[in-house]
Amino acid sequence: QLTDAQSASTEDQRRLALLNEQVAQLQRQVAGLQDLLGESRAREAEAGTQIDSLGSELNAALARVAAEERRRAELEAAERARLEREAANLERYRSEFFGRMRDIIGGRDGVQIVGDRFVFQSEVLFPPGSADLSPEGQAQIRSIGQLLLDASREIPEDIDWVLRVDGHTDNAQIRPGGAYASNWELSQARALSVVLYLIDELDFPPERLAATGFGEFRPVVPGSSPEARAANRRIELKLTER
């Protein structure tokens, strides 16, 4: 019986030692889990701080973008208002200017004022098929150009104006072998000839001039009758904004 009791006691001690070892392992695991939990909480706290910082930076960036958009909208509105004022000023000046020009020019041969344009018939300015100003054409351009130059000095400096010289032809085909391959080239050459004459002979500011050719594509009288073609062969001078 004593031997049996001693054996049972030894077995109990072994079991107790095993249980103690298992408890120790569990305690170590719990300690490890507690460490992991602490690290996780620390990372969460750091992440929360970073999120708060990023949120603040995002809000500041959005505020800067909104302020920049407001500033840009204000600048665009101011620029639109400035351009509208310039256009209104130029229109008012142009109306007064052409009113005075009608009184000065009256019924002068070879030139008309139609709306906001001076219209010269090409026969008055150029020989047929040529872009070289004739003596009579030079006299006409010199006379009108001097009036325009004198009047232009009264235009306010804040108005960005330009005198556009438009060349137009009739719809008759250019003869092969001529100096110009198309009516478009002829109209452009004639407009440029007038512009260069204004610059060379009258010291007209070149930055205030533009030469444009329309060929036969902007007729004032439709058709191919001699009368229609004569009306469509023309040079137009128009005071406009750049």
Image (tube, helix red, strand yellow):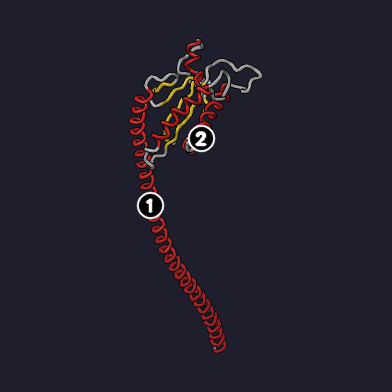
The circle drawn on residue 66 is 1
Q: Secondary structure at mark 1?
A: helix
In the picture, the quarter occupied by the N terminus is bottom right
The residue carrying mark 2 is: 199
- Quarter of the rendering occupied by the C terminus: top left
Q: Is residue 139 above or below residue 4?
A: above
- Please state which amino acid type lies under the numbered disc 2: Ile
Name which residue type carries label 1. Answer: Ala
| Secondary structure of residue under mark 2 | helix
Query: Marks 1 and 2: which is nearer the front?
Result: 2
| Residue 84 image position (x, y, % from top left) | 35, 38
- Looking at the image, which residue is at 36% across and 44% down? 77
Return the x and y of residue 110 as percentages of the image width and height.
Answer: 45, 19
Q: Is residue 21 left or right of residue 162?
A: right
Residue 46 coordinates in the image, percent (x, y): 45, 68
Name which of mark 1 and mark 2 comes first in the sequence.
Answer: 1
User: What residue do we see at 47% from left, 38% from top?
Assistant: 205
Q: Is residue 32 left or right of residue 241?
A: right
Instruction: Residue at the far right: name it.
Output: 177
Q: Nearer the viewer, residue 6 or 66?
A: 66
**What residue is drawn where x is 43% and y is 31%?**
146
Q: CA distance from mark 1 to mark 2?
A: 50 Å
Q: Nearer the viewer, residue 236 or 7?
A: 236
Left or right of 216? Residue 155 is: left
Q: Residue furthest bottom?
A: 2
For the residues labelled 1 and 2, say whether their Cβ atoms are less than 8 Å apart.
no
| Mark 1 Cα-neighbour bin, 10 Å: few <14, some 14–19, many ≥20 | few
Residue 217 vertical placement versus 145 (above, below): above
